[in-house]
Image (spheres, rainbow, N blue to C red):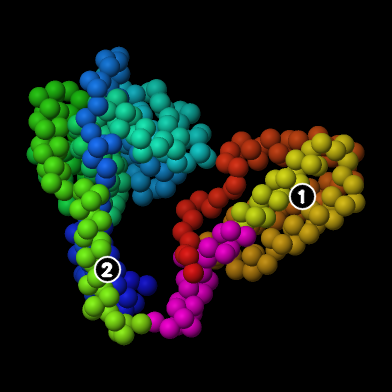
Amino acid sequence: IYELPVPKISISRAVQSLLKERAGSESFYLPMGLNKEVFAPQKQKAPTEFKRVLMVGNYLMPYKGMKDGFEALAKLSTEMPVQLVMATQESRGRAIFENLKFPIELHYCPTEEQMPAIISSCDTYCCTSWYEGLGLPAIEAFRCGVPVVSTRTFGVSDYGIDNVNMLLAQPNDPHDIYLKLQRVLSDESLAERLRREAFKSTEERYDWSTSAKIFMEHLDEIDRTYEGAGRIDRGEMQLLLDDLEREGNLTPIAVYRRFQELATALKTLAERLRTEKHPDSEMLKELSGLRDEFRPYLANEKAEYYDAFKAKYDWCQLILSLKDNVRFSECLELMLTRRQEREPRTAASFSEIRYSVQ
């Protein structure tokens, strides 16, 4: 898809170079921006008994390297009292935290306005990713005056200099992450120097107004340069999208929205069934209809969305198989309780959904 003759924008010089080297594709560089009035040094951090280490992101995605960070913190906790401060949009899989040997403070879906206070309450921010296009949370920490420990991802090379404005560790190396965290949390003079240099290094960069101006300049250049050239007709694009969907690399937005609609309808029906001691024929007919709506999306087991639709289809099948069971309501209650424990969000979602607006 990166080889298509259409204009592309890269969020870092590292990504721009990668596109050129791997796909032979030119792209426009657009530096990310953040609101520097929001992300700014806060009040002096209140003293705590713990060294607070911030991590941000989806702990279920392996490439985020969260388990590497947890292992590093576990080792560090034998030397000093540490606390993990986790900011995430993920609500599933909380069992991952159950056996950790240090306390955790969890922030679920914090707003942009809340993040500066969360960042500033910590002694360091730690990025453990194996790769990132940029790594904006590190820059946010820079602006809030919090020292950063990061793995050597692609994007960090745009702004991070080891032992100057941050400490860099090897990706997928818990021991190296531990060593860098140990340094920054044990040496206040080092932490203060990193804070100062990090803030200074972003003083003239990563500003929203500058990014918006550059973006508009790129759009003007694209209009001039690409007018009448490099166009892909709708049929060719649809063939590409179909192939990506077939190979499990894309979930069309229409499929994603249909899943949400069906999942919501199933949840509503399940709650109605819950209030009945035994389902009537109309409810069973409605449940059977919903099951049949899920079925067409099971044709391709390689599809990215297959598992999500299959889980709902199987759930419908199981309920229908229990319709004559005298313990129907008891079984349904147990199933609903277990489903809520596994999937706490209102609308079920795919594990790593990527979809395209067509």
- Quadrant in the picture for residue 293: bottom right
Which portion, as a residue range, is magenta? 232-258
Which numbered tag is attached to residue 219?
Answer: 2
* Screen quadrant of the N terminus: bottom left
User: Which amino acid is tagged 2?
Assistant: Leu
Residue at image mark 1 = 318
Judge depth for marks 2 and 1 and give the one in front: 2
Q: Earlier in the sequence, mark 2 or mark 1?
A: 2
**Left or right: 164 with respect to 46?**
left
Count neighbours of disc 2 (C-alpha within 10 A) and say few if under 14, some if 14 to 19, many if 20 or more.
Answer: few
> Residue at horizontal 25%, vertical 63%?
216
- What x and y, as percent, mark residue 176? 22, 38
Viewer-proximal residue among 12 and 61: 12
Residue in the picture at 20% in, 37% down: 142
Label 2 sits on a secondary structure element that is helix
The residue under the point 71% across, 39% down is 336
In this picture, is 19 found above or below 173?
Answer: below
Examine the structure image and report whether residue 92 is included in the region drawn in magenta: no
Report x, y in % for residue 221. 22, 72
Tell me the chief SS of the magenta region.
helix
Residue 140, x across and y down, in percent: 26, 39
Q: Is residue 76 visible?
A: no
State the SS at label 1. Answer: helix
Residue 321 horizontal side relative to residue 88, left or right:
right
Image quadrant in which you'd find residue 111: top left
Which three-letter amino acid code belongs to the residue tagged 1? Leu
Q: Which label is found at residue 91? A: none
